[in-house]
Image (cartoon, rainbow, N blue to C red):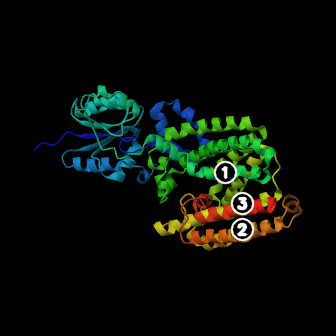
Amino acid sequence: MAAAPPLVVDLDGTLIYSDSLLEGCMQLWRSEPFRIAFLPFWLLRGRAGFKAEIANRVSLDASLLPYNQPLIEHLREQRRHGPVVLCTAADHRFAQAVADHLNLFDDVMATAGAVNLKGHNKAHALVARYGKGGFDYAGNDTPDLAVFAQARRAITVNPSAALKRRFAEVHNREDGPSGNSESPWFAHWRALRPYQWVKNLLVYVPLLAVFNRSKASALIPATIAFVAFCMIASSVYLLNDLLDLRSDRLHPRKRTRPLAAGSLPIVNGLLLIPLLLLGGFALAVSVSWLFVGVMAGYLLLTVGYTFWLKRVPLLDTLMLAGLYTLRILAGAAAISVVPSVWLLSFSMFLFLSLALAKRHSELMELQASVTAESIPGREYRAGDLMVLISQGSASGYSAVLVLALYIDSDAVRAQYRHPEIIWLICPLVLYWINKLWLNSQRREIYDEPIVWAMRNRVSRGIALVSVLLLLVARWL
């Protein structure tokens, strides 16, 4: 029985759900952020030269790429009947790393020297090696049309929207195994991490602290500030996910994030970041220039946290606590009020406890799922659990102490008719702190602690009772 013609497979977008060149760029940005300034100059060398510059500086970890597993299984089956070839415009070092990892291909053709092996260049190379109609080809985008025209069979895998519009040009087309079924729109939505927007409700805290009928109109700038904060925060989440592709893929839950899983193209994430920043700061300008300044400070701090500070143990949790507290400062700036020192002190201690609980829950989850000794992308180790518990509990108790001192202050006596009622909030907060750390120790916190608090019925109940006690103490 004669062997079947070679089955030639593209890499980017076909064999993997991502783009190997952009993966390399993100890895370079992560390790040498200032090297990005050289990208325009490397582009002057042409696409092949540009790819070579990236491959010279990073080693692609092929084991962590988001592979199209149904296609891989199909290729293993097809290999029983004929050779399977990897043919890609990626740099030959990246292509060889993938081939070595999969141990699947009989031959590898990739970009080397001055020729970018894409579109017509790829078609000419394949025809020169196998003859016109002497091979089958699996691809996913419009540059593959030139190759489809020379192939015996055209197999479309994860076809791009542009390729779908031109399906009529591919007369020998058949659908290949795609595997990725997530809606592109839903992938974009998930990448914004909308569940994290719960944290941005903290911008309303200064308004609640001073709310009365005369302050009702301040609800509008506070709401605009909330939306602006969500947009700017989501841009930073995208940046964080782009730079943490490797560590996210090692994480038991973060590996399902759209960028890490490949359901959202890297280029789309790169485009969304400036769009969200422009929209967020446009809204911020409509609130006040003071609010713009606070948001600029938040952006600088979060970028610093993303690139460097989150890998410094303990300093990272202080930064997280500061970023939570900055949301309260942003809310105060939006409605032009001066936040209470008591409120800021209480917030800093409380949020530090939450930040430490976040790291503690990540370590607990890591212990339960893998054998690694540290959190991917962080410098915490399994032996740090007791340190995190002691520091987090102490910080939470300090927040309760600040609250107790505040209740006994002249400011409370001036605002509340029955300040003694507010004392009942102290044991409620104390119970909540203890519950937070007990649940973390039991591996029952899977989200960020503040998100967990919003979803937890006991936490919501304590918050509701606390608000009712404040209202009774003020108006009874």
Q: Quadrant of residue 310?
A: bottom right
Which residue matches tag 2?
A: 395
Q: Nearer the viewer, mark 1 or mark 2?
A: 1
Callout 1: few (<14), some (14-19), or many (20+) C-alpha neighbours within 10 Å?
Answer: some
Which residue matches tag 1?
A: 201
Residue 92 location in percent, x, y? Answer: 39, 42
Compared across the picture, whether 362 is left or right of 136 comes to right
SS type, badge 1: helix
117, 207: nearer the viewer = 207
Residue at the (53%, 45%) spot, across then down = 26
Q: CA distance from mark 2 to mark 3?
A: 23 Å
Q: Amino acid at mark 2?
A: Ser
Q: Amino acid at mark 3?
A: Val
Q: Amino acid at mark 1?
A: Leu
Which residue matches tag 3?
A: 467
| Sequence-first disc among 1 and 2 | 1
